[in-house]
Image (cartoon, grey):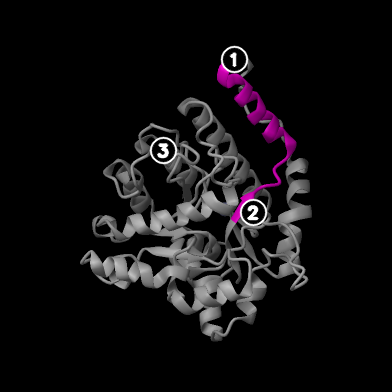
Amino acid sequence: MIIDCHGHYTTAPKGLQDFRDAQIAGVNDPSQRPTGDPKVSDDEIRQSIEGAQMKLQRERGLDLTIFSPRASAMAHHIGDEAISRQWTRVCNDMIARVVALYPDNFIGVCQLPQSPGAPPANSVAELERCVTELGFVGCNLNPDPSGGHWDSPPLTDRAWYPIYEKMVELDVPAMVHVSSSCNPNFHATGAHYINADTTAFMQFITSDLFKDFPTLRMIIPHGGGAVPYHWGRYRGLAQDMKRPPLSELVMENVFFDTCVYHQAGIDLLLKVIPNKNILFGSEMVGAVRGVDPESGFNYDDTKRYIEAANITPAERKAIYEGNALTVFPRLKTRLQARGLLG
Ligand SMILES: [Zn+2]
């Protein structure tokens, strides 16, 4: 199987955005706040998926996408915690509807109702609802709900521990994933995302988080930000700080996806990062939508780079399937139950 661990519902029907627009209008004028569910039919969902994610899955030969709400639209910084909670719930419910319509092609990962200044513990109930009621297999955890101002404690602070306790209890991983940036210094997908990936890794190195939670699993997307390219820096920093080697310190718990949009970047990722820590991902349809004139193919057609990489068939299979099943045990159980795994 080829499992894409990183896909967002970037093509959701207009009714979802209408709901969000009403919510945003309601930030200052409560009378405009929407109630109930967004007006979106199953046919609209089918249309939005068939022409985009499903089409690309078929064209590229991918089997299943681990699917979450559009990351840039999480925008935890808009409105207060109640608005974030309502938006999170409708976005997660929308993912559940996609999975119900295409159970062999998608599995859900939830966004969390985070909000600047709100205790992370307040996100635990929605995580539990999504996993136990909607059948989701993981969550996206935003290390910076402020949208680019970084005024929350680091991911290693005990304030985050209630989420980790629930993740461990439910046996689900988190993808560390920021949302849109409201700081004009940081372009969302070009700077804020990559900064956050790099920042999260360095936070993990400086803490005993994975001593406290030996089975906690974190996926750092976008190829791990700057980390693989600067691997020597991180090894050296850990050494200078008298920390254990990275293999012991973080690499039983931290995983990188393959959302790196050129061959040389993927080659470096695969050379530097242990095979067991790499999950196939494309983030389609998403961050970069164009065609690379140098290759003639979409930048985010990441399977091509894995196919062309100098690795063994067993290593390739681990990246496509095995590692994802290890990191997402609930996905494995689900695929086995549906007879989709050998
Ligand atoms: Zn993403």
Note whether ligand 1 is within 8 Å of mark 1.
Answer: no
Q: Please, is residue 59 above or below residue 28 in the view?
A: below
The residue depicted at 60 percent of the width and 40 percent of the height is 73
As drawn, the label of residue 29 is 1
Note whether ligand 1 is within 8 Å of mark 2.
Answer: yes
Residue 48 screen position, x and y as percent: 75, 47
Q: Main secondary structure of the magenta part?
A: helix
261 in the magenta segment: no
Closer to the chain start, of discs 2 and 1, is 1
Whether label 3 touches label 2, CB < 8 Å: no
Q: Please, is residue 259 above or below residue 138 in the view?
A: below
Circle 2 SS class? loop
Residue type, mark 2 in image? Ala
Closer to the chain start, of discs 3 and 1, is 1
As drawn, the label of residue 287 is 2
Give the position of the C terminus as an image quadrant.
bottom right
Task: Left or right? Give the position of 252 relative to 240.
Answer: right
Residue at numbered disc 3: 123
Circle 3 SS class? helix
